[in-house]
């Protein structure tokens, strides 16, 4: 089974005070995620990002796209993503 995929959904427009309008990551966070090798660290990062999206708002489009990405890569999404309202 593959590692937890990047939360990036290929929008990459940093217009919300330095946060991507697609996934809410900053450029620094994108670089950090790429450095994470252990799956538990990647899962924790995605969980943190879900919380960040909740606080910032306007990221409801992210969940279905990320779930589709996980399905394509045959990775079970973490509970924080599956349970997002």
Image: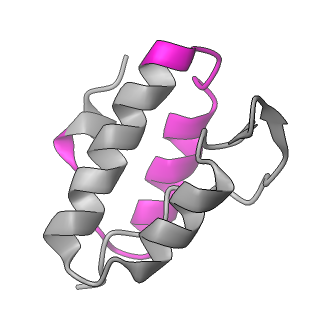
Q: State the image coordinates of residue 73 (x, y, percent, origin top left).
A: 43, 76
Residue at (25, 28) in percent of width and height: 83
In reply to whether residue 58 is colored magenta, the answer given is: yes
> The N terminus appears in which quarter of the rendering?
bottom left
- Please indicate, yes or no, whether residue 77 appears anywhere in the rendered image: no
Relative vertical location of residue 83 with respect to residue 49 in this rendering, above or below: above
Task: Name the residue nearer the viewer: 54 or 35.
Answer: 35
Q: State the image coordinates of residue 56 (x, y, percent, origin top left).
A: 55, 17
Residue at (32, 40) in percent of width and height: 48
Tell whether 52 sits left or right of 47.
Answer: right
Tell whether 37 sits left or right of 29.
Answer: left
Looking at the image, how many numbered discs can be counted on the residues? 0
Task: Name the residue nearer the viewer: 21 or 71.
Answer: 21
Q: State the image coordinates of residue 44 (x, y, percent, origin top left).
A: 22, 53
In reply to whether residue 2 is colored magenta, the answer given is: no
- Please indicate, yes or no, whether residue 28 appears anywhere in the rendered image: yes
Residue at (46, 68) in percent of width and height: 32
Task: Name the residue nearer the viewer: 41 or 10.
Answer: 41
Task: Name the residue nearer the viewer: 21 or 32.
Answer: 32
Residue at (84, 47) in percent of width and height: 13
Q: State the image coordinates of residue 11 (x, y, percent, origin top left).
A: 79, 52
Residue stretch in magenta: 55-79
> The C terminus appears in which quarter of the rendering?
top left
């Amino acid at each position: 089974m593959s590692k937890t995929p990047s939360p990036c959904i290929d929008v990459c427009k940093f217009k919300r005070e330095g946060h991507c309008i697609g996934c809410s990551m900053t450029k620094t966070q994108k670089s950090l995620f790429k450095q994470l090798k252990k799956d538990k660290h990647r899962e924790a990062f995605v969980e943190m990002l879900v919380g960040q999206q909740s606080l910032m708002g306007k990221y409801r489009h992210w969940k279905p796209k990320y779930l589709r990405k996980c399905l394509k890569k045959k990775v079970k999404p973490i509970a924080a993503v599956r349970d997002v309202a």
